[in-house]
Image (tube, rainbow, N blue to C red):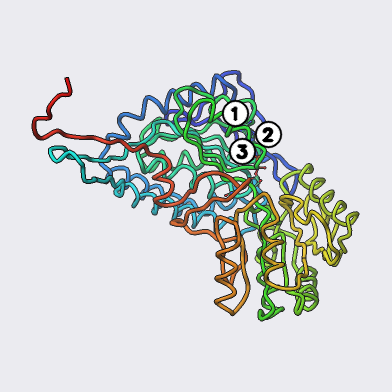
Amino acid sequence: MPIASGHFIAGKQVPSCNSQTFASHNPCTGGIVGYAARGDALDAEAGVSAASSAFKAWSGLPPSERERVLLRAADRIEQSAIDLIDLLIDESGSTQSKARFEVNYTASLLRTAAGEARRLYGDTFPNDKPQRISLVIREPLGVVVAITPFNAPLVLLAKMTAFPLAAGNTVVAKPSEETPLIAVRFAELLSAAGMPDGVFNVITGYGRECGEALTQHPKVQGIALTGSTSTGRRIGAIAAAGMKRVQLELGGDNPLLVLADADPKKSADIAAVGAFYHAGQICMASSRIIVERAIAHEFAEALTAKAASLHLGDLRDQRTAYGPLINSQALARVDSYVRDALANGAELLSGGQAATGLTYKPTVLWRGKHISRPSCGEVFGPVATVYPVDDLEAALALANDSEHGLSAGVLTNDLVRGLTAARRIRCGAVHLGMHSFQSDTLAPIGGFGLSGIGRSGGKYSVAHFTELKWISVELGETPNPF
Ligand code: NAD
């Protein structure tokens, strides 16, 4: 029986003002998981108005009260794990283990954010005027709009909203049109945990129809987007025009360096997770694997064997490595990426075609020949390209030959070479001894270049979604200049 879901505004589900709905599909079966409200500018107005009305009371609560609500929300998430996991599998094509990871990590994000509610530290500084005392305090911005993608729909919704909420902001979230139902479920759990009405709202629908209206709304002071670079450009321009604080977490084109001293087989196992987890639909996926020539062939053979051994099938089967791409356009895009690479000198070592339905085979490409433009942008599919290189200098030059700069990994046992690489790779994160897909609730997540602006996570999100205010106090008489 398909779920019928509304927007979540001021503590309850409501239909769209225009009564329109749209279907949320199961990418594995093609069936309809449910129908969500299809928002437009009027619904955006209602969401922002609810958030704006709730701001004074929420921001005025003692931090311990905001902490309490977020901690209870984490408990609710864990208590609802079975339902949430089912919905994540059905609506987003997650495997059981990826869905479980999302639920656990969401609870962890909420608990980390709860702690941040007590840490809105300010500052003081010495004044040249001896009779003056200066204080610097932090205040929430007001209404923050959070726009999120389909690939980790629960975790990214929590990551973009829990920290702004902890800091005293109120939120209107706009989830991906591919995954609206999980977002409304999240809002209901927050509400059941005691989140006051209007503090957390969800408007479902399409970016152009309701997302833009939200970002353009004059009562919105902050925008948090996790999405593609092209959406980031559009929202960044809207934010600039409205002088709104904006955080953009965008696409990646991430390098994994495998240095000559690394074990080729173990490295291939790590690289396979980095490249193929959730069918490569991870912003930090290790899609460019740059290997020192001494072990490049052995590494590529091991990665090819690993790719061929991956089990694709029932998402609830523990053996299944990954599931489908989100929709048929994504499948066509990934396939055309592979065709383009093959037409431009790459060699196919494994995969290179759909398996069944929207599932694409784990694909390994070998880029042995010189190519003038090695980085072809984000693939967002289960495709790993292996680039043999002569030495560390060549590896670093290739790693940095990208307009993106989200995350990187370096596999080596040589700490000096590893740290040298970490210092020189232009990415928001570099992980030694691991692939590029890593997360931590306290880490500053974000990228260089086209991978975005700002950092999210822990105190970094709180800093981003608060304003600093200087308050000065004159303790004595100050002579007037006239
Ligand atoms: P997308 O950019 O198509 O959509 C993201 C969200 O933006 C959706 O909710 C969509 O409806 C909304 N949107 C689109 N156009 C809009 C507009 N004009 N105004 C307002 N909202 C608009 O991205 P996607 O396909 O859902 O997700 C995949 C992308 O997200 C990839 O590029 C991936 O790298 C990126 N991503 C980045 C991170 C990170 O942390 N850097 C994490 C996950 C995903």
Query: Which residue position holds label 1?
Result: 37
> Mark 2 CB in 8 Å range of ligand 1?
no
Closer to the camera in the image, 244 or 315: 244
Query: Which residue position holds label 3?
Result: 232
Which residue lies most toward the right here? Answer: 343
Instruction: Locate the N terminus and report the quarter of the image it occupies.
Output: top right
**What amino acid type is highlighted by mark number 3?**
Gly
Where residue 272 appears, as percent x and y from the top left, is 70, 67
The residue at 80%/76% (across/down) is 297
Query: Which residue position holds label 2?
Result: 23
Which residue lies most toward the left here? Answer: 476
Where residue 122 appears, as percent x and y from the top left, is 28, 45
Tags 1 and 2 touching, CB below 8 Å: no
Residue 439 — which label? Answer: none
Closer to the camera in the image, 132 or 409: 132
Badge 1: residue crowd in 10 Å (few <14, some 14–19, many ≥20): many
Closer to the camera in the image, 121 or 195: 121
Quadrant for residue 179, please give it: top right
Which residue lies most toward the front here? Answer: 482
> Mark 3 CB in 8 Å range of ligand 1?
yes
Where residue 367 appears, as percent x and y from the top left, is 82, 64
